[in-house]
């Protein structure tokens, strides 16, 4: 049984874990602006806790294709008050979705117990800061930068290229002093990937298990559903739940989702059928 120690709060990975998404941004692609106010963000987090989430992932910078970067100060102003409020109100671990070392430091000081970095600690100083904070870190694969990553992404062999990248980032993280029991990996669905690339990665997700770290997968409401089924973002719930189950079936230990209640129910059923994983 694996339990991640998230700054004193537990994330149990002996059964599929659900990470609920809390965007505190004005421009996230599916719910941008709605949760901008602090009160709304907190209410949304509490709702996800009631629905059975295992960890709440708070992000203050949209990484959707085409999104513009935000300043350190702007990102802090969005996320830190929400993390501080949630520290008191919920007992689950809170994850900070950021690439900026300054935001990582402030977020952990405010109560976050997990770092989710779509840039896999490649920003200057991020490896050293993350190591000093002693909380688990998710290292995600991304080809290119959000602004341009969906302009004709190319790979020699997408599964092998992603695995090679994650292996190298795990090595860099360990070399910086982050022990293996604090590392999680993520192939980064939709981050510089075509529909065909995403499908190949999902089918081959189990191959990442050989890297020895728990796997996080984020497929919720993503454009691969839009491309495959022609559905707008507000109609992607059922396919998102299906993809979460497929990801778990293929080896994911954590799924990052917008719709917590239906995903929790689907994965509870999965766990009844596959109690040993
Ligand atoms: C992911 C993420 C993901 C991790 C986003 C969206 C775009 N972090 N942050 N994995 N996606 N670890 O939610 O559609 O797939 S932002």
Image (tube, rainbow, N blue to C red):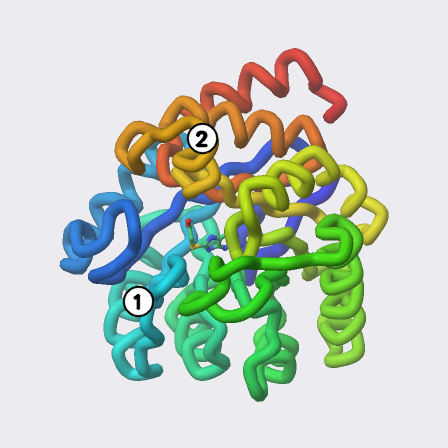
Mark 2 CB in 8 Å range of ligand 1?
Answer: no
Residue under numbered circle 1 = 79
Label 1, label 2: how far apart the Cα atoms are: 26 Å
Badge 2: few (under 14), some or many (20 or more) residues near its Cα, within 10 Å?
many
Q: Depth check: give the residue in front, 240 or 229.
A: 229
**Percent from the top left, x then y, of residue 21?**
38, 47
Residue 212 visible here? yes
Q: Quadrant of the N terminus?
A: top right
Q: Residue at x 75, y 77 (%)?
A: 177
Residue 12 visible here? no
Contact check, label 1 and label 2, Cβ < 8 Å: no
Q: Residue at x 26, y 78 (%)?
A: 74
Tell which residue pokes out farthest to the top in this image: 273
Q: Earlier in the sequence, mark 1 or mark 2?
A: 1
Residue under numbered circle 2 = 240
**Number of the front mark, 1 or 2:** 2
- Left or right: 42 with respect to 65? left
**Percent from the top left, x then y, of residue 73?**
29, 83
Badge 1: few (under 14), some or many (20 or more) residues near its Cα, within 10 Å?
many
Q: Is residue 188 above or below residue 233?
A: below
């Amino acid at each position: 049984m694996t339990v991640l120690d998230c700054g004193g709060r537990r994330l149990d990975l002996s059964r599929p874990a659900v990470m609920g998404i809390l965007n505190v941004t004005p421009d996230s692609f599916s719910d941008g602006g709605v949760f901008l106010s602090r009160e709304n963000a907190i209410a949304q987090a509490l709702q996800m806790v009631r629905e059975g989430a295992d960890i709440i992932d708070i992000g203050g910078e949209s990484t959707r294709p085409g999104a513009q970067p935000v300043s350190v100060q702007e990102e802090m102003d969005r996320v830190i008050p929400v993390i501080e409020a949630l520290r008191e109100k919920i007992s689950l671990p809170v994850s900070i979705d950021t690439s900026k070392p300054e935001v990582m430091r402030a977020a952990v000081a405010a109560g976050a117990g997990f770092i989710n970095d779509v840039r896999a600690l490649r920003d200057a100083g991020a490896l050293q800061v993350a190591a000093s904070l002693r909380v688990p870190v998710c290292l995600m694969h991304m080809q290119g930068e959000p602004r341009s990553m969906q302009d004709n992404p190319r790979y020699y062999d997408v599964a092998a290229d992603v695995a090679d990248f994650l292996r190298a980032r795990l090595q860099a993280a360990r070399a910086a002093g982050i022990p293996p029991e604090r590392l999680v990996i993520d192939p980064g669905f939709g981050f510089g990937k075509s529909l065909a690339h995403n499908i190949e990665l999902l089918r081959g997700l189990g191959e990442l298990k050989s890297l020895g770290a728990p796997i996080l997968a984020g497929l919720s409401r993503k454009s691969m559903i839009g491309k495959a089924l022609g559905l707008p973002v507000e109609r992607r719930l059922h396919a998102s739940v299906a993809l979460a189950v497929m990801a778990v079936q293929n080896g994911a230990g954590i799924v990052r989702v917008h719709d917590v209640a239906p995903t929790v129910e689907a994965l509870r059923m999965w766990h009844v059928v596959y109690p040993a994983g």
